[in-house]
Image (cartoon, grey):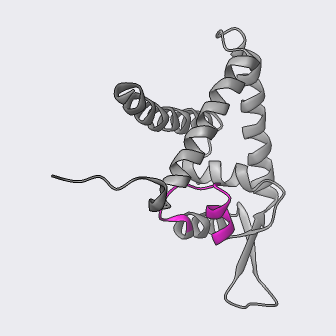
Amino acid sequence: MRQPYYDSILLIERLHRHFLEVLKTELDRLGIQDINNVQSLILYNIGDDELTVGELTARGYYLGSNVSYNVKKMVENGYLGQERSPHDRRSVRVRLSKKGLDLRDKISAMFERQIDALDKAGLSDEELTKANDTMRKLERFWSASLDYSAFPVTSAA
């Protein structure tokens, strides 16, 4: 069980990096240089929502410690609009601008091309569903592991 577990951890991280490279390649193909792959993934995940920076992280739309920097850059480059909450002036809500919506549509088109190619690559809906179920179980396991009482304390002796 030890090696498959370690392999899973490494594979998840590697898959995420490969997917970010796919996004980078698509941005390059489109001639888009004012947003990076991580920012474009955040943008795609925002979709039609209006969110705070904290909500981006809480919903799992962003992985990393510099979400504020990325949001700032996307606002500066015209992909996001922002406004302060009328109820809490410390809170800023972001949403896609017209430019952001246009890029989201281009990323959606890339996803559609990939979905069409999945079957040819030998990946069925059933296989992806099973892989997703397994990853959700790992997510629940790791979330539960944050509650240290879920695991027995072992002696270091």
Q: Name the residue at 79% across, 48% down.
A: 102
Q: Name the residue at 74% across, 47% down.
A: 103
Q: Name the residue at 59% across, 54% down.
A: 39
Q: Nearer the viewer, residue 29 or 61?
A: 61
Residue 36 at least partly seen: no
Residue 135 at least partly seen: yes
Q: Quadrant of residue 84?
A: bottom right
The image shows residue 67, relative to residue 143, as above or below, that is below
Q: Nearer the viewer, residue 145 or 96?
A: 145
Image: magenta residue range:
54-67
Q: Nearer the viewer, residue 33 or 103?
A: 103
Q: Residue 151: x, y in percent?
A: 43, 53
Q: Residue furthest left?
A: 157
Q: Residue 146: x, y in percent?
A: 49, 59
Q: Name the residue at 54% across, 45% down.
A: 141
Split into 4 quadrants, where in the image is the N terminus? top left
Q: Is residue 79 left or right of residue 31?
A: right
- Numbered label tally: 0
The verdict on residue 65 being magenta is yes
The verdict on residue 66 being magenta is yes
Q: Is residue 46 left or right of residue 22?
A: right
Q: Residue 34: x, y in percent?
A: 58, 54
